[in-house]
Image (cartoon, rainbow, N blue to C red):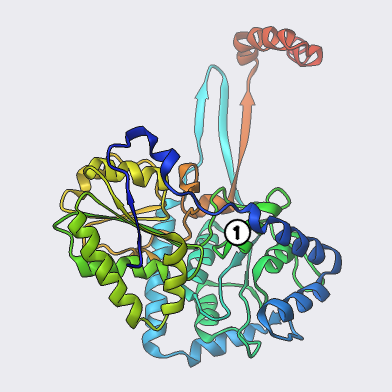
Amino acid sequence: MALQRLDVRGLGDRLDEVLPRPAPVESVAESVAAIVAQVRTEGDSALRTLTARFDGVEIDDIAVDPQEMKAALERIPERLRDALEVAHRRIADYHRRDAPDPVQMSSEGISVTELVRPVARAGCYAPGGLARYPSTVLMCATPARVAGVGEVVLCVPPRPDGRIDDASLAAAAIAGVDEVFRIGGAQAVAAMAYGTETVRRVDVLVGPGNRYVAEAMRQVAGAVGVPAAFAGPSEVLVVAGPETPVELAAMDLAVQAEHGPDGLAWLVSWSERTLDEVGEALDRIVAASPRRAELEATLASGGYACLVDGPEEAIAVANVVAPEHLELMVDDGRRLLDLVQSAGAVFLGPWSPAALGDYVAGPNHVLPTNRSARFASALSTRDFRRHIHVVEANRAALDVLGPHVVALAEAEGLDAHARSIESRR
């Protein structure tokens, strides 16, 4: 059986102690730090050296000619272009509704408003190389454009021939990307964070990747804006009951697991028969899949079939795992929704596969992984905007509120703070 069996019945509030945890990111931190330091020091030369080492490609031109995006858009099949444009429209529509309105408040002679300002330059990372992810190009660049970012740049690992695939370039054209660079991995993150001769530094960095990419984003945070979420290898947790369609549950486990190693695929049920049948169906899918190696790698390290006492306990497990994708493939999924505390995105019922969210549902598929859903959320327009407070007071406000400022300033021993108020009264 592809899934490791766990029996957590009766464990209650001990779940956090006994459930397996993701591999520590410290295991790659030292390697990533060396890559980041090399890019900071050597610039473009490091990017060429590291691309040859990790991607097996000798590149002369790091930047992709903008005309290549337009040409790719013309070359791709009409069916794919239609799909990209539909996905782009739905992603943009969702993120326009997601954009927050400025805060306004006025009381006791003080008005407080906000200036909402997009960052000047955003960097997007889309995985590539052996696979291609034009959907990630759309998911990263579209909310940046909706947020009003001035310049949007994209890094994608090159294929063995040194090119970026047409689908990703076409998605970049549709989403309005300004610059594309044929670099990947931690070196791409470092280049966008600190800048090189060819790649100008950005203000915000977004996008999912493997552990090296996610760890690199963690390390450069502070030098550049990075969302709080750890957007690493893909994860799914499927809650299934006796009524769950076995083949659909197995397929949805395979959907996220086929991204490759280091991800998670959890099946949680209170029915041993369901665990057995879904596991057997998953074994058949793995055996027949063209991405069998990726599936086996993920399931060997992060595939679990977890037996619980009931539906409520299944959600308790989900809240500890805090999965990127949570599928409630049960009849009473909406009732269980009230118990969900930590998940990147939730998909209700057998007709709402996570693949919808990956492509065309509208909300972003760049989601928190590695249990960061405990404190982080999906990528949104808020990650590309700054909120600047504007405070305006009149003399009456100082008469009413000034004494309180003076009292607090004196308690903290900050004489100039108190005098700045008293000198105005």
Q: Quadrant of residue 86?
A: bottom left
User: Neighbour class for label 1 at 10 Å: few (<14), some, many (≥20)?
Assistant: many
SS at badge 1: helix
Q: Quadrant of the N terminus?
A: bottom left
- Residue drawn at the location 42% of the way across and 47% of the way down: 322
Task: Tally the numbered discs.
Answer: 1
Q: Residue furthest right?
A: 41
The vertical placement of 49 against 386, above or below, is below
- Residue drawn at the location 50% of the way across and 60% of the way down: 143
Counting from the top left corner in percent of width and height, residue 103 is at: 50, 36
Q: Quadrant of residue 421?
A: top right
Counting from the top left corner in percent of width and height, residue 333 is at: 21, 49
| Closer-to-camera residue (41/225) | 41
Please, what is the three-letter code of the amino acid marked with disc 1?
A: Ala
- Residue drawn at the location 49% of the way across and 91% of the way down: 74
Q: Is residue 305 found left or right of 210 in the rendered image?
A: left
Q: Quadrant of the C terminus?
A: top right
Residue that badge 1 annotates = 214
